Image: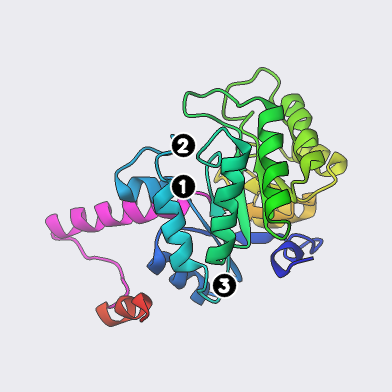
Amino acid sequence: MTPFAALHHRPGNPLLLPNAWDHASAVALAAQGHPAIGTTSLGVAAAAGLPDGAAATRAQTVRLAQRLGRGGFLLSVDAESGFSDEPDEVAELAVELARAGAVGINLEDGRADGSLAPAARHAAKIAAVKAAVPELFVNARTDTYWCGRDAPEAEALRRLDAYQQAGADGVFVPGLADPAAIARMVGVLAVPLNILWSPSGPGLVDLAALGVARVSLGSLLYRAALAAAVATAAAVAAGEPVGPVPGYAEVGALGGS
């Protein structure tokens, strides 16, 4: 078991995975004691002026992994659907990310048009990645709760079973927030369950009690940073006080060498 995988097997102590969008955000989060940092595809895409979930940010994602992969923390990369429908091409991406220093990859079955990729196709991607880079932790994400399915739990379980059989090391169900449904999934899955934290869902302590192994923050921090930037500009314009912010030298030090 790799050190990153081990963080998913601590009963009652789920991995809280904050998601960064650039070097400074990753280093700042790691400095707060987070042993592992994920990336956020939305943050990477929006910062580059590109759409999320449309396979438009492969180059940006690889470059960020190359910058962060030797940063002294464990790095998991949000790679959308692998930026390709071809399992071999997704496996090639996984090799690139692993060479850059990434220890995990997140692969989703949701598509930009709101549909879901065929489960067999997504499973084939997972199998191809595990064959190419066995040590890379594959977090297989299903978007049944975000794609308007009539029975999202049943469809999620069907898909997650296929993904774990294909070799996924963990599974991710964003949008799942009902405690009873979370408990049911934990009870039937053979691999760790990842939940996306939601302000309207269970807190970290409750998710730990339910058996959740990993709690991701997704694009939350990027969106919060945007909100803080806009609010700060508005406060200055209105002559209102501005809250404490990091100093120039403190942020400059995050740039490294």
Q: According to the image, label 1 marks what residue? A: 41
Element under disc 3? loop
Residue at point 43%, 34% (across, down): 54
Between the C-alphas of marks 2 and 3, the distance is 26 Å
Picture disc at residue 179: none
Between the C-alphas of marks 3 and 1, the distance is 19 Å
Element under disc 1? helix
Q: Is residue 235 left or right of residue 148?
A: left
Q: According to the image, label 3 marks what residue? A: 73
Residue at point 66%, 34% (across, down): 122
Picture disc at residue 53: 2
Earlier residue among tags 2 and 3: 2
Give, as a single range, the part of the protein colored magenta. 218-247
Callout 3–callout 1 Cβ contact below 8 Å = no
Depth order, front residue of 36/201: 36
Earlier residue among tags 3 and 1: 1
